[in-house]
Image (cartoon, grey):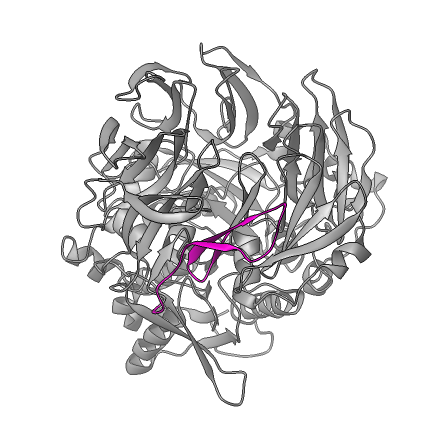
């Protein structure tokens, strides 16, 4: 086995306060769970809802209950709408699920009107128009449902549309009386027209399912027929009489929503249905939009995730024909964003082994087929989010890990392929770009530095307009950056945080990977668990993180290691990293190993504790315990349908191996989790009981997948800490404990 190469992170990132001689620092403040979680985020709450005015002259954001504005000229921020005025147009508190969706899916509470002189606020379904000239707000509509009902201005600013009762309503803004129901949902609530259902919202990152035509005369919408999608009950046991909410949730092999694209006039009337070969409606339509007022573009994805096509369609007749096709023998990359306009199509694809930008062209006068013009980026790196495509100016603004696979910078590339880096400084940068200039917001962080927000102008000048609270007094320390070779020779990146000032005495080691498709845990950016890792270290634990094969940001082959492999290869890589650090750090105690994780990481915890006898204690938060239980889109992408890969569903579902659990388990679950349902925990517990295996259970009433809130997070992380204290620390004076 190749030994780890430990490189101090301070050498990679430059001098920081954590690398100064201890004698030059004041005594470090101790961390506690209460310090980190009980009073909201220790670093403060970064601004939310960053949005540029359509004319690109002003940037707005929500900060501390106020709407703040910053001129493009990089002046000082000032309050645009006060806390008192925002409170006066606020509705009742959102439900737990709705607030979780707003936070998790970054759903905005307000938007700019096309005239850049008005703002629209969505407050629990009530729509308020705020006039920036006179500072007054007027309620103009009520969606009749929960917030997040996707209000939109028509391009000419004459109309406002929104989703209501599973259909689309439109009102004329100069006469905001009774809205016109352009599309009315049937009384059985089984057909969504323009509304996004749970599985599209979660797994396809679909944020809207209807769009105005450029001439403001028509709307294109996705219709989702949900009648055959199974129902899942989510029970609230807090009231005296328990209440049950149900959601349409397709599990692997179940019927998906039957989807179709339609076009309807602004005044309602007959719908024109687009004729697409989508196999009985069971394939997916992740994205669609208008090319011009007569033509639509529509992206389709086959249910097996192997074929991704772009169609051009006539809005008047519904006739459609394929413009370009992308395929993969296992599964296509799950970045489905497409930008179409001015005769060009921009999208990302990993056909050459890494996710890169590609430019296609089509005839604007007769959109028919698209041809590949050029690959705009190339190399051993990944293109991440594409923030903006300026088709008229032929420029693309995007993020990538070019130059350092553990960092992210902001870039610009022209349609000719000329590239330049826009951000500077080690760490992770993400951007929010102006729609009318080269200005952008640069959100920057490192492992030791929480997010800082800068407004950067096209000239290159950047000025900080928001910073997190200072953490110098806590003397956070950088973990060791490690590289370990997997069994097949692949380089795996890891970090190890050791207790400060430890001697060669034995130190318990806690492994905390995510391990599943998508997220990259080992990166030079601020993360949710940075402070908790330091707290564990202050309590005498070492913390190890590693990205195994099957995770993201490392190319197609690295990601596709998860195809038909949801456990063995991931555990093999994690154990290789554990063995390497045990070899290189003799103070680590191989007999006192722990493991914890959340979501896929929670599943991974259960897989490790049922497929290895090396871990004395583990914590699994919101885990999938049987892959038959999770949703169709995500699971089938990697595991195919149950009938096509039955042995995988049998072998990789930890419920089937529960009787082999080794080590003491703490299982934590929110009862209101609409993502990984409570049934996963119940099924796993049943198998533990049948096998006579002890366990600890912590439930969080009404809480969703995030188990959010200062009180809940304080309780959860206190339980995690005490669990490892109890089972990984020696119990002094207790004979026969084996410690």
State how many labels appear. Answer: 0
Q: Is residue 450 visible?
A: no
- Front-most of residues 500 and 203: 203
Left or right placement of residue 696 versus residue 278 in this view: right
Q: Is residue 355 above or below residue 514?
A: above
Res 26 seen here: yes
For residue 418, above or below residue 628? above
Give left or right: position of 59 versus 473: left
Q: Residue furthest bottom?
A: 240
Q: Quadrant of residue 24?
A: top right
Quadrant position of the N terminus in the picture: top left
Residue 387: % across, % down: 53, 31
Queried whether the magenta region covers residue 183, the answer comes back as: yes
Q: Residue at x 24, y 64 (%)?
A: 228
Measured from the top left, where is residue 59 in percent x and y?
A: 70, 35
Q: Quadrant of residue 446?
A: top right
| Viewer-proximal residue among 440 and 544 | 440
Residue 516: image location, x then y, percent:
38, 49
Magenta span includes 408: no
Q: Which residues are magenta?
A: 162-188
Choose between 485 and 462: the one closer to the eye.
462
Front residue of this view, candidates 360 and 721: 360
Residue at horizontal 59 percent and vertical 27 percent from the top: 435
In this picture, is 575 found above or below 558? below
Residue at 41% across / 53% down in the picture?
196
Q: What residue is drawn where x is 29% and y is 26%?
A: 351
Rendered location of residue 244, percent (x, y): 43, 78
């Amino acid at each position: 086995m190749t030994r780890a190469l430990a490189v101090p992170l301070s050498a990679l990132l430059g001098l920081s306060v954590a690398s100064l001689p201890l004698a030059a620092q004041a005594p470090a403040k101790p961390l506690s769970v209460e310090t980190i979680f009980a009073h909201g985020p220790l670093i403060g709450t970064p601004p939310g809802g960053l949005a540029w005015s359509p004319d690109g002259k002003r940037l707005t954001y929500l900060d501390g209950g106020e709407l703040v504005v910053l001129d493009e000229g990089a002046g000082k921020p000032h309050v645009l709408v006060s806390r008192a005025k925002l409170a006066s147009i606020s509705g009742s508190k959102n439900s737990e699920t709705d607030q979780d969706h707003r936070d998790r899916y970054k759903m905005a509470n307000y938007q700019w009107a096309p005239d850049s002189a008005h703002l629209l606020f969505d407050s629990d379904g009530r729509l308020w128009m705020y006039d920036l000239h006179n500072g007054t707000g007027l309620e103009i509509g009520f969606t009749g449902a929960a917030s997040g009902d996707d209000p939109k201005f028509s391009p000419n600013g004459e109309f406002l549309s929104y989703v209501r009762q599973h259909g689309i309503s439109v009102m004329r803004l100069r006469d905001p009386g009774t809205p016109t129901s352009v599309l009315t949902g049937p009384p059985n609530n089984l057909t969504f027209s323009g509304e996004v259902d749970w599985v599209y919202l979660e797994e396809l990152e679909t944020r809207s399912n209807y769009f105005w035509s450029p001439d403001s005369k028509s709307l294109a919408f996705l219709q989702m027929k949900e009648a055959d999608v199974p129902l899942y009950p989510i029970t609230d046991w807090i009231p005296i009489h328990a209440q049950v909410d149900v959601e349409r949730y397709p599990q692997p092999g179940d019927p998906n929503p039957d989807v179709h694209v339609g076009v309807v006039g602004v005044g309602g009337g007959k719908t024109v249905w687009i004729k697409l070969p989508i196999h009985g409606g069971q394939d997916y339509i992740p994205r669609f939009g208008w090319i011009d007022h007569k033509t639509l573009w529509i992206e389709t994805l086959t249910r097996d995730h192997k074929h991704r096509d772009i169609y051009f369609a006539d809005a008047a007749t519904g006739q459609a024909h394929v413009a370009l096709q992308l395929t993969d023998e296992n599964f296509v990359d799950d970045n489905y964003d497409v930008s179409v306009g001015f005769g060009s199509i921009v999208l990302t694809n990993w056909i050459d082994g890494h996710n890169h930008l590609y430019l296609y062209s089509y005839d604007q006068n007769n959109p028919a087929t698209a041809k590949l013009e050029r690959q705009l980026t190339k190399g051993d790196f990944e293109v991440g989010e594409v923030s903006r495509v300026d088709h008229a100016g032929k420029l693309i603004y995007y993020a990538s890990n070019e130059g350092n696979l553990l960092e992210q910078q902001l870039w610009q590339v022209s349609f000719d392929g000329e590239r330049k880096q826009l951000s500077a400084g080690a760490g992770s940068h993400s951007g929010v770009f102006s729609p009318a200039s080269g200005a952008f917001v640069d959100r920057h962080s490192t492992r030791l530095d929480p997010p800082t927000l800068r407004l950067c102008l096209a000239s290159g000048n950047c000025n900080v307009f928001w910073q997190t609270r200072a953490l110098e007094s806590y003397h956070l320390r950088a973990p060791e950056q490690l590289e370990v070779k997997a069994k097949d020779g692949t380089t795996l990146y890891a970090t190890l945080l050791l207790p400060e000032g430890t001697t060669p005495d034995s130190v318990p080691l806690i492994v905390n990977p995510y391990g599943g498709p998508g997220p990259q845990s080992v990166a030079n950016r601020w993360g949710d668990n940075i402070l908790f890792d330091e707290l564990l270290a202050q309590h005498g634990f070492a913390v190890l993180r590693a990205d195994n094969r099957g995770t993201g940001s490392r190319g197609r082959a690295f990601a596709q290691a998860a195809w038909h492999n949801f456990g063995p290869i991931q555990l093999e890589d994690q154990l290789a990293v554990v063995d390497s650090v045990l070899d290189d750090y003799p103070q680590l105690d191989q007999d006192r190993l722990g493991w914890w994780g959340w979501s896929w990481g929670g599943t991974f915890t259960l897989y490790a504790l049922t497929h290895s006898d090396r871990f004395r204690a583990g914590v699994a938060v919101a885990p999938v315990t049987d892959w038959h239980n999770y949703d169709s889109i995500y699971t089938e992408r990697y595991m195919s349908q149950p009938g096509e890969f039955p042995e995988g569903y049998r072998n990789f579902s930890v419920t089937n191996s529960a009787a082999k659990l080794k080590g003491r388990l703490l299982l934590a679950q929110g009862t209101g989790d609409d993502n990984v349902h409570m049934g996963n925990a119940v099924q796993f517990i049943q198998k533990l009981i049948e096998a006579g295996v002890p366990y600890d259970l912590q439930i969080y009433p009404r809480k969703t997948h995030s188990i959010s809130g200062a009180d809940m997070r304080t309780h959860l992380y206190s339980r995690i800490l005490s669990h490892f204290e109890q089972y990984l620390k020696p119990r002094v004076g207790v004979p026969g404990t084996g410690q």
